Image: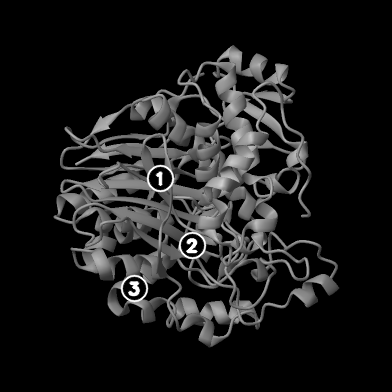
Amino acid sequence: MTWETETVEGPDGLVCCVDRLASDAGVAVLRAGGNAVDAAIATSAALTVTTPHMCGMGGDLMALIAGPGTGSAEPLVLNATGRAGSGADPDRLRAEGHRSMPVLGDVRSAPVPGCVDGWLTLHARLGRLPLADVLAPAIELAEAGFPTSPLLAFLLPGLAGVAGCDELVLSGVKAGDHLRRPGPARMLRAIVAEGRDGFYGGEFGERLLEAGAGEYLPEDLTTSLADWVPGLALDVWGHRVWTVPPNSAGYVALAGAGIAERAGLPTDAEDGAWAHLTVEAARLAGFDRVQQLSEDADGPALLAPDRLDARAAMLDPRRRLPLADSYRDGGTIHLAVADRDGMAVSLIQSNAKEFGCHVAVPGTGILLHNRGISFSLQPGHPAEYRPGRRPPHTLSPTLVTRPDGSLRAVLGTMGGDSQTQLVLQLLARLLRTGADPAAVIGAPRWVLAVDGGTGFNVWERPEAHRVRIEAHAPASWRSGLEERGHEVEVVRPDPAGFGHAHLIDLPVDGPPRGASDARAIIGAAVAV
């Protein structure tokens, strides 16, 4: 099976995301006169309604924005990721016997969610339409209802017994069942009516404090969790590639591209050497991520030329490199939007794991994420679980500019620890092989895996990496990798295991062209 993907042209605007209903929401806002930021917020909000297994108002987001109307010569970068509550106590978790953060059923894995602050901060600076108009499509979906997607219906039984999830578990039993979301609809209307106070200072915030049982204090909810930050960039393959600086792991994708360029990555992606060099570039870029990544990590230093030179020098084109282990299925979506004026947005929002930590804020229908699973419980670790800290994040939205500073592309994917590996492959196909959006998105992929993998622990055991490749990958990939010492697993078609990527390419002399990942099954690139 191959993933047949279509390139869609959108001279008046384009939205690419994992759910056609959400793409339509963004397009409706563009048609109403909104810009790319309005459409990105509308799409994001719709996704919190229709894909609660992947994202929600109880999660986080990161975004990059560039083009006319931003008021900036460089891309704008927003980090709207939450911080651990004031009650965060690593000693207590260690005393309970935890060696790593709890994953499910425990609010301690849920930093205060930053998604809504992200929307409001984006809208305040760059939005064009009233917030009520921007959130109207999501409110309509939540109140009127929508057909349950096949993936959501498949996953909903996993919420059986989770308090506060009856509206999901009882209504979305089968694919196509009509599902209403009255709780999120009420929260969205409160945001329209009262802004930030309607959410963090309203019913959601009050119920979050109760559910937290001391993990969060009122002051944790009073200050915006969204910050404008300097972008992190690397020049590679004749372009400048941008991402969010740490606490994002985006630097790993950029470093991988830099190492692959230094290693002389061939232009023929069918070549077994292409697979080996991209795999090894990713491993060399990320093998020490567990030790390096925290909100205080120095992004530019992690991309310093001498550092990348040294890692590229370690890459052997003939064999897999042994790497020392470190000392220590995703619920994420990416969306891409471009408007008729040339502004574009790359945005990723996430629950971390599917349905987050499986804790719903009572009465709201909103599930809390569990991005706190990326905190360390090792005393003194730079990402140790502590009050007010942001956890390491896999979210890696990406944006590409030309040497003259003009916008070339926005792209990204879901995928937990695989995100940066997949972004590296997307960049290599777009910038090194010159493929069009459909070819970039539909092409076969590989991901690194370890036994007992959770989707978020790949970098804890880099020596144990095996390479999972999609079944429609060329035979030269398997033979080329195995000849060089890699353990290879060929995987049957897997709609979730290799990311859901989206790309909008902005040619110098033509309309934006986009592609949405067929692996998402219900995803769509929709033109205005």
Q: Percent position (x, y) of residue 326?
A: 76, 50
Element under disc 1: strand
So how many labels did they put on this image?
3
Residue named by callout 2? 60
Q: Can residue 499 be spotted in the picture?
A: no
> Which dot marks residue 191?
3
The quadrant in which the C terminus is found is: top left
Q: Left of 72 or right of it: where is 164?
A: right
Q: Percent position (x, y) of residue 110?
A: 60, 67
Q: Left of 201 or right of it: where is 250?
A: right
* Disc with the residue nearer the chain's start (1 vs 3): 3
Q: Left of 308 or right of it: where is 66?
A: left
Q: Percent position (x, y) of residue 305?
A: 53, 46
Q: Residue at x 23, y 60 (%)?
A: 70
Q: Residue at x 25, y 38 (%)?
A: 506
Work out how far the residue at label 2 is from the one at label 1, CA to CA, in angstroms: 23 Å
Residue in the foreground of this view, choosing between 411 and 23: 411
Q: Residue at x 48, y 70 (%)?
A: 364
Residue named by callout 1? 241
Q: Amino acid at mark 2?
A: Asp
Q: Quadrant of residue 212?
A: bottom right
Q: Amino acid at mark 1?
A: Val
